Every structure is written in structure tokens, then in C-alpha cells.
Image (cartoon, rainbow, N blue to C red):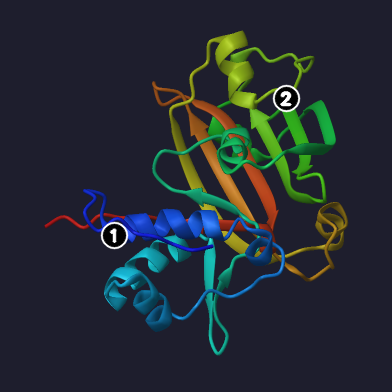
Amino acid sequence: MKIALDHSSHIPLYIQIEDHIRNMIQEPEYKKEKKKLPNEIDFSRQLGVSRNTMRQAINKLVYEGLLVRKKGIGTVVADAAITSKAGNWMSFSQEMKTLGIEIKNYELYVGWVKPPKDICRFFEIEEEAKILKLERLRGNPEHPFVYFISYFNPRIGLNGNEDFSRPLYEILEKDYHIIVKLSKEEISALLADSSLAEKLEIKAGDPILKRKRFVFDPGGRPVEWNVGYYRADSFVYTIESEREI
């Protein structure tokens, strides 16, 4: 793909380059064949821009998880992965819709259980109380890549007969008038045991990411306790921070 920049445009050159590269890496020769990009020096000369401008554009795409720099090889298109950012958090369904990833439910289980003590403390309920537990194995049409376990505050009123093929927070908002506002998350790495490996179609001992999420309503009341186990080759978590000056 030939890239032509408009040097008279009000849009900065590095942003124009970003947009062109985004389109370029969707071409089959880059997306499927993993063709590497020209090196920064050659690329910048080709476009008539400084190397710093080219690096700024490529760094942004590396940050977003679209490109990967490999030592001794160069810059190549990253394998398809879920990319999640801290800040304006979204539900899993919203994340996938934003990324254009078609989601398939491989397993779905709903039942009433006595939760562990830490979850009882989170919801401030008696240890003998039964609450709704939702388990979902989800992924793209090719393979599953995340296994979710959710527990819900019994005060919400979920009965277990909901259509959980719908987006979860849509059910809470439209059917139960519950707005989720705040998410506190913990990310950790671990090795898959035999049970998780079987579900995620990987080998026991392969790395996975554990993403624990505590969800609250605008009043600070707990709504959901959730943990997701992700295939490590399918999840990128990025954090953007702004320094005060």
C-alpha cells in the first residue's frame, strides 16, 4: 500500500502515519502472512518525515498492541489479542464489540451456591446465604480464550432465569435498574492447572492471566464479584497514566 501524506493538513503527520499503518496492516500480506514493516529509517525516508515522527507513530501502535517489535527481526503485526485499558472501563461484551471480535459462548452455567467467606464479606451477607453464581467459557469462533466466574449481590434480585447470552450489564440496567459505576481490578499471572487448561484448550502449566474485578454501583454498593482466567496469548492489558506537572 502506497502511503501519501498531506504536509499542509492540520492533522499532525504522525497521526496521518498511524491511520495509514492501521489500514495497511489489515491487508492480507500483513495480517495473515506476518510480513514485517519497513525499518524506521527506510520508512521515514520513504514518507519524507523525520525518524522521530515515524517512531512516534509506531510507538503508539505498539502501545495499543497492534504492532510488536522483535529483536533481530523488526516490527511486525501483533497476533490478535484482547486489549483492555484502565480508565473508562467496559464490560467484556463492550470490549469485544469495540475490537470487532465476534464472541461465542462455549459453556454457560447458572446456579445457586454458598459462596466462599471472602465473597460473603464482600457482599456483607451471612455465610449460610445462597447467592447466584454464573460461569461462562467464552471466546471467538476459533477457540475459547477466557473462563469467567461471577457472583452477584442477592439484593439485586436476579433469579437465574435471565438470558445470559445478553450483555450482563445490559440485563442489570434494563431489567433490574442497576447501574454499575466503579470497577476495581487485580491482575496476576499464574500457570494453568489441568481443569483450566482443558477449558481454554491449552496445556497444563501454560501461562494464563487472572483478572479479578469488583464492581460497584454509584452509591458504592457491591454488585458483582468476578474473576476471569485468560489465555496469555489472547490478552493485553495497558495502563495509561498522566503525570501532573
Quadrant in the picture for the N terminus: bottom right
* Residue at disc 1, secondary structure: helix
Residue annotated with mark 1: 13
Looking at the image, residue 222 sits to the left or right of residue 207; the answer is left
> Residue at image x 42%, y 82%?
42
Which residue, as the protein is rendered here, is positioned at the far bottom? 72
Looking at the image, residue 41 sits to the left or right of residue 7; the answer is right
Camera-nearest residue between 195 and 54 = 54
Residue 41 image position (x, y, % from top left): 38, 83
Category of crowding for the residue at label 1, using alpha-carbon neighbours closer than 10 angstroms: few (below 14), some (14–19), many (at least 20): many
Residue 195 image position (x, y, % from top left): 86, 56
Residue 10 image position (x, y, % from top left): 21, 48
Quadrant in the picture for the C terminus: bottom left
Quarter-wise, where is residue 121 in the image? top right
* Residue at disc 2, secondary structure: strand
Camera-nearest residue between 189 and 99 = 99
Residue annotated with mark 2: 132
> Residue at image x 46%, y 39%?
89
Camera-nearest residue between 35 and 77 = 35
State the CA–CA distance, disc 2 to disc 1. 52 Å
Mark 2 residue type: Leu
Mark 1 residue type: Leu
Among numbered discs 2 and 1, the one appearing first in the sequence: 1
> Residue at image x 41%, y 26%?
220
For marks 2 and 1, give the one nearer the viewer.
Answer: 1
Looking at the image, residue 109 sits to the left or right of residue 13; the answer is right
